[in-house]
C-alpha cells in the first residue's frame, strides 16, 4: 500500500455537523424518559453516562437520527465531488468522530458520503485501520486542497 493515500476526515468539520442532531436527541430522550441527563460535552464520555442513566439508548438514538437527520444534514456537492475524485484515484477514506457510531453512520448516509468511506470510528480506530501515514483532515478547505 506504499503509495496509497489514506485520509481520516473529521465528520463534523468536513461532512456533516452532527452536534445539533445530538443535542436535539438528548433533549428528546430526557423528555421521553423523564430522566435528567447531565452528560459531558465529549460524546465518548457522554456514552458512558448514558449507559448508566438509560441503559440501551443506542437504538433510540438511531431511530431519532434516522427520522430527523434530513432536517440538519444535507449533501454538499462540492465536498462529495472531492471524495469521489479521491476514491477513484485509490485513496482509502475513513471518518472519525466522537459521536456514537449510529449517529455517525446515519450522518454519512444523509451527507451522501457513505459509499466512499471505508471505516468509521474514533480517530484512533481510523488510524489503526488505515495505517501510519494517514492524513487527518479537519475542514472542507483542507479536503479541497488535497492533491
Image (spheres, grey):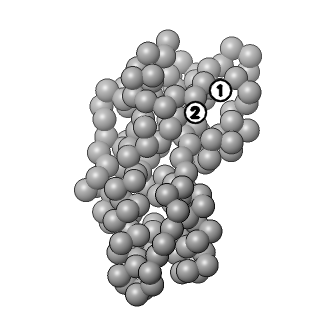
**Horizontal relation, residue 96 to residue 25: left or right:** right
Where is residue 62 shown, x and y percent of the image? 45, 66
Q: Which residue shows up at 52% across the image and 28% down it?
A: 137
Q: Which residue shows up at 43% across the image and 43% down it?
A: 12
**Horizontal relation, residue 108 to residue 120: left or right:** left
**Earlier sequence position, callout 2 versus callout 1:** 2
Say the numbered circle drawn on residue 134: 1
SS under mark 1:
loop
Where is residue 97 shown, x and y percent of the image? 54, 47
Residue carrying label 2: 8
Q: Tags 2 and 1 in contact by the CB under 8 Å rule?
A: yes
Marks counted in the figure total 2
Where is residue 51 shown, x and y percent of the image? 60, 75
Say the numbered circle drawn on residue 101: none
Given the current orientation, which residue lies at the most extreme bottom position? 34
Mark 2–mark 1 Cα distance, whole angstroms, equals 6 Å
Look at the image and tell me whether residue 124 can be seen: yes
Amino acid at each position: 500500500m506504499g503509495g496509497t493515500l489514506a485520509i481520516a476526515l473529521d465528520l463534523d468539520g468536513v461532512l456533516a455537523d452532527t452536534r445539533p442532531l445530538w443535542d436535539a436527541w438528548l433533549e428528546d430522550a430526557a423528555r421521553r424518559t423523564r430522566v435528567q441527563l447531565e452528560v459531558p460535552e465529549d460524546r465518548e464520555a457522554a456514552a458512558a453516562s448514558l449507559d448508566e442513566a438509560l441503559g440501551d439508548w443506542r437504538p433510540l438514538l438511531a431511530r431519532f437520527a434516522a427520522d430527523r437527520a434530513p432536517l440538519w444534514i444535507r449533501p454538499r456537492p462540492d465536498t462529495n465531488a472531492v471524495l469521489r475524485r479521491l476514491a477513484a484515484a485509490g485513496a482509502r477514506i475513513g471518518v472519525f468522530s466522537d459521536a456514537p457510531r449510529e449517529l455517525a453512520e446515519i450522518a454519512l448516509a444523509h451527507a451522501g458520503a457513505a459509499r466512499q468511506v471505508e471505516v468509521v470510528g474514533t480517530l484512533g480506530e481510523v488510524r489503526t485501520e488505515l495505517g501510519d501515514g494517514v492524513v487527518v483532515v479537519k475542514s472542507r478547505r483542507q479536503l479541497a486542497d488535497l492533491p
